[in-house]
Amino acid sequence: MKQSEELQKPGAENGQQPGRADEKDSPLEKLIDVHSKALDDLVNVNSLFTIAVFIGLSFASPKQHSLENRPECDADPVVAKTLVTYEVISFACFLVSSLAAKSLKVLLNFYKIRDYIELVGIPDKCLRKIILSSTWRHTLFMVSALASACGIIFLTLSMVNVVQIRLGKLSCGSVYTLKSVISLTVLVSAALVLLYVPPVIFAFFARMKENSDKKQSNTV
């Protein structure tokens, strides 16, 4: 009788533990999958921006003349040094963002199997409370998003210096330089504020809502 009852338990015929047969299709699993795909996309975008960083560094060579054909419009070495500085900071931001995103993806995968992993002694308690905690995951998520946003900002500033090197300094009053800088600044700012920030805020609060719902279900 006991053997027949065990065979009738949900998930027993598939070799799964009772009560975990539908875990793969649970809202938590779906939410983790969505965030994992989003993190992959973020890393891919950071890689494309990193390529743009190295392309911008090629314009930092000395004694470059602008297309204005006026000596007073040629960028001085300070502009080239500023370009390299912004490019390096931008590269560092994208690198930090990608590392944080990859770390968060690893933690999300471990979070799905948290009931099956165990460390011996004190490390298990410390790592489970810190590394697998929602606070640490939220921190990595915000670090990745903010670092990527900062990288975009510094990359935009470096592109302003590239425009000054190729089209002439802003102080020179070149129409082409002003059009390029204004268009670049407006479009990137609008993309960050309208297209990037809202989904990031939504994803952050979606995480918090999932954790709060889980706490409520545990208390019931």
Image (tube, rainbow, N blue to C red):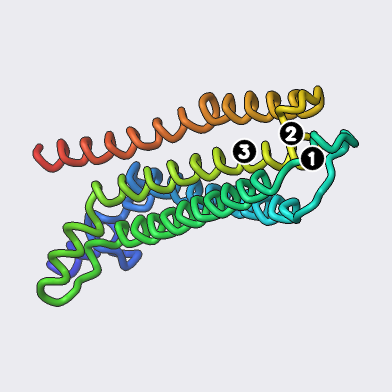
Which residue type carries mark 1? Asp
Distance Cα–Cα, label 1 vs label 2: 7 Å
If you read the primary sequence from the N terminus, does the residue marked by circle 3 or circle 1 appear first? 1
Distance Cα–Cα, label 3 vs label 1: 20 Å
Image point 51% across, 26% down: which residue? Answer: 193
Which residue type carries mark 2? Lys
Which residue type carries mark 3? Thr
- Disc 3 crowd, CA 10 A, few/some/many (<14, 14-19, 20+): many
If you read the primary sequence from the N terminus, does the residue marked by circle 3 or circle 2 appear first? 3
Measured as percent of width and height from the top left, residue 161 is found at: 68, 40
> Which numbered marker is on residue 169?
2
Image point 74% across, 41% down: which residue? Answer: 75
Instruction: Kindly report which numbered mark, 3 or 1, lies closer to the viewer in this rendering.
Output: 1
If you read the primary sequence from the N terminus, does the residue marked by circle 1 or circle 2 appear first? 1
> Which numbered marker is on residue 144?
none
> Which residue does the numbered mark 1 point to in the structure image?
74
What secondary structure is marked by label 3?
helix
Residue 41 in sight in this render: yes
Q: Is residue 217 left or right of residue 143?
A: left
Quarter of the figure that contains the N terminus: bottom left
- Disc 1 crowd, CA 10 A, few/some/many (<14, 14-19, 20+): many
Image point 81% across, 27% down: which residue? Answer: 176
Q: Are marks 1 and 2 in contact (CB under 8 Å)?
A: yes
Farthest residue to the front: give it.
72
Instruction: Please tell me which residue lies in front, 82 or 154.
Output: 82
> Which numbered marker is on residue 156?
3
Instruction: Kindly report which numbered mark, 3 or 2, lies closer to the viewer in this rendering.
Output: 2
- Disc 2 crowd, CA 10 A, few/some/many (<14, 14-19, 20+): many
Task: Examine the rendered structure and indicate whether residue 196 appears above or below residue 77.
Answer: above
What secondary structure is marked by label 1?
loop
